[in-house]
Amino acid sequence: MHLMKWLTGTVSGLMLVSCVTINIYFPAAAAEKAADRIIEDVWGPETQPADTAEPEEQDKQSSASDSRLPLAMSVLNWMVPQAEAAGADININSPAINALQSNMKTRHESLKPFYNSGAIGLTDDGFITLRDAKSVPLKDRNQLNSLIAAENNDRKALYAEIARANGHPEWQDDIQQTFAQRWISNAAKGWWYQQGGSWKQK
């Protein structure tokens, strides 16, 4: 009986420690800020991130959630933000990242009319795609397809370069997921994006 209690306690402890390690390992909040800085530079200041809840409401939700957590988890939830705040950061300043960002910024001037018309939209995995081919004149379709391909290639390279620049190539999927959310959050009113397998308009 004592052995079972000890084993249970040890396994639970290891699971809690692994959760903390995962949360600290990828600095999600810092990644979101880094993504927002790049997106604002590429798209311009007219697109701003949209929060889904008011700060006061978010605080209430957080407090209510904390009150239902066991003491150990509450302590861990306190420790993780402290550890992240102590030194978590995402480096987005490298020659490769700067070059990709510059390419995307220049290309955006050509893509913007197609975002505005709804011809292209943001996918939920961090890329763009042709949404309504009928709204694009036949003479412009090849050019648009080339722009979409170039944009997606640069985005894929950007996610990989940010992970590499921070010494963690294995972060690429996390970086891509973060950008996927932030592209949509920063999208201008009227632009289209994918969510749950269907198209929605901002």
Image: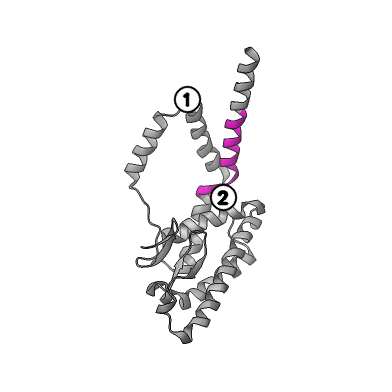
Q: Is residue 103 visible?
A: no
For residue 165, the mark is none
The location of residue 38, given as percent across then percent down, is 51, 62
* Residue 199 occupies quadrant: bottom left
Q: Residue at x 56, y 55 (%)?
A: 175
Q: Which residue is mark 1?
A: 71
Look at the magenta stretch and give its main secondary structure: helix
CA gap between label 2 and label 1 equals 29 Å
Identify the secondary structure beneath mark 2.
loop
Q: Is residue 24 magenta?
A: yes
**Which callout, 2 or 1, points at the residue further toward the start of the chain?**
1
Q: Residue at x 60, y 43 (%)?
A: 25
Which is closer to the viewer, label 2 or label 1?
1
Q: Quadrant of the N terminus?
A: top right
21 to the left or right of 30: right
Q: Which residue is mark 2?
A: 89
**Vertically, is 2 above or below 114?**
above
Q: Amino acid at mark 2?
A: Asp
Q: Amino acid at mark 1?
A: Leu
Residue range in magenta is: 14-29
The location of residue 123, given as percent across then percent down, is 48, 63
* Residue 5 occupies quadrant: top right
Q: Quadrant of the C terminus?
A: bottom left
The location of residue 23, given as percent across then percent down, is 56, 41
